[in-house]
Image (spheres, rainbow, N blue to C red):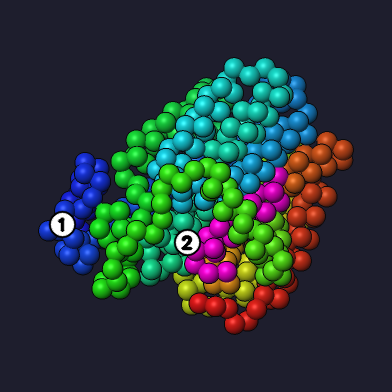
Amino acid sequence: MLPSQPLLVSLSCIVFTGALPNNGVDQLKTRFHPAWLVAAVTFLVLLTSAAFRSSVGVLVIPFEVEFDWPRSTTSLAVALNLTLYGLAAPFATTLMEHMGVRNVIASALGLIALGTALTTIMTEPWHLIILWGVFVGLGVGATALVFGSLVVTRWFSRHQGLMLGVMGAAWATGQLIFLPIIAHSVNISGWRTASLTIAGASLCLIPIVCLVLRDRPSDIGQLPYGSDLHRPLTPEYNVHSGILKAAASSVKILREVIASKSFWILACTFFVCGWTTNGIISTHFIPAAQDEGLPPTAAASLLAVVGVFDLIGTIGSGWLTDRFDPRKLLSIYYGLRGLALVAMPMILGPSVEPSMLVVMMLFGLDWVATVPPTAVLSTRIFGAKAGVVVFAWVFAFHMIGAAVAALLSGVIRDISGDYLIAWLLAGSLALVAAIAPLALPRHLTQ
C-alpha cells in the first residue's frame, strides 16, 4: 500500500501548481513517486475508453430491431471504427510528443462524448457509420494502448513489462467487464440511455486528465521511476511543434522500419490478435450467443468473465515478459487462443454450461497477454524512442485485423446464417500466428 501522505502532497501540488514542492522532492523520491499517480489516471482512461468502444457489441441487435438494418451494415460501422481506432494510434503518439499528452487525450475524450451522444438522434445507417465509425473510432484510437505504452516508457525505468501488462489489462478489461452493466441498462432503459451515459462519463474524465497528467517526469522536477537519481534533468522535446510535423515524424519512422522482417512479424501477428479479440469476440460474441438462444445479459456476463481473467492474465504476462523470452510467450499465447476459438462453436448454446465458463476463463487469461511481449519486442528491436511509434503502427495492424474480422464475420453470418465458418477461420489464423514469433531474432538489443 502506498503511503497516503505523500500521495496527497503530490496530488495537491500537481493539481494546483503543476509541480512538486522543491523541499519535498527528495522525500517523494524515496516514499512516493508521482509516476504511480500518472499511471493510475492513464489506467482509468484506458479502462473506460475501451469500455466505450466495445459497448457497440451490446447495441448491434437493438440497432437492427429499431432500424431494420442487416448485420453487415452494423458490422461496417464497427469495422470503420476499428480501422480508424488503429490508424489514429501512431499519429496520436506523435501528436502527444509534439502537442502534449493532456491536450490530445482531453480532445479525444470530447470526440467520444460527441459521437456517442449524437447517435441518440440518428435515423440512417450512414449516421452510425460517421458517428460511431469516425468520431468514436478516432477518439478511442488516441486513448488506446499506445497511450499507455507512451506513459510507461516515459515514467518508468523499472518494471516496464509489468506496467505494460497493467495498461494492457485496463484496455482489455474495460472492453469486457462493463458490458453486463451496459446490457442491463439497454434492457431497462433502452440503448439511447446507455449512449448518453457513455457520453457523460467521457466528459467527466476530461477535468481529471487536465488536472493530473503531465507529459514527462522532468516537467515536475522528477526522474522516471527506478532511474538513476544522479542523472540530470533535461528537457527532451518541444511541445506545440505542430500536427503536420507530428504526422511526418510517424510516417518517417514507418518508412525506416517497413523493410524489416521483424516489423512484419510483429505487425502480422498483432493483425491476428485484433482479428481474434476485438474483431470477432468483442463485436460478434453477444450477437452469436443470442443466435443460439442465450440472453444478451448472460452473454455479456460471459465477456465480463473474460475481462476479469484478462486482468490476471495480462498483468501476469507483463511479469513473465520481464523474465522470459517474449517470442516464446507469444507463441504459447496464440496457440492457446487458437484452440479456444476452434472450440467455441461446439460449446456455445442456449445456456451457460461449465465447459463454456472454462473456455471463457482460459480465453480471458490469454485475451491480450500478447500486448506486453509485443510492446517490449518493439522497443528492444527498434530502440526506446522509435519503438513506441513502431508499436503504435503494429497496433494499427491489430485494429485493421479487428476491422476485417468484424466486417467479414458479419457478412459470413448474413450469407450462411451462423458464425461457424467465422469461428474456425479465426482459430486457424491464431494457430498460424503461434509459429511466426519464433522467426524473430534470438538476441534482441536491450
Q: Pointer 1: residues within 10 angstroms few (<14), some, or many (20+)? A: few
Name the spot of residue 260 as percent of width and height, x first: 69, 69
Depth check, mark 1 against mark 2: the one in front is 1
Q: Residue at x 18, y 60 (%)?
A: 25
For label 1, the SS is: helix
Name the spot of residue 396 as percent of width and height, x first: 64, 51
In this rendering, is residue 250 above or below 244? below
Image quarter in which the N terminus is found: bottom left
> Is residue 357 visible in the rendered structure shown here?
no
In this rendering, is residue 412 above or below 234? above
Q: Based on the picture, tell me whether residue 400 belongs to the magenta stretch.
A: yes
State which tag comes first along the sequence, 1 or 2: 1
Label for residue 22? Answer: 1
Magenta region, main secondary structure: helix
Q: Residue at x 70, y 19 (%)?
A: 124
Q: Residue at x 59, y 44 (%)?
A: 88
Label for residue 253? Answer: none
Which amino acid type is shown beneath numbered disc 2? Leu
Name the spot of residue 299 as percent of width and height, x first: 62, 42
Q: Nearer the viewer, residue 107 or 337?
A: 107
Which amino acid type is shown beneath numbered disc 1? Asn
Bounds of the magenta segment: 382-403
Report, in whole angstroms, how far the alpha carbon at label 1 lies from the one at label 2: 30 Å
Label for residue 164? Answer: 2
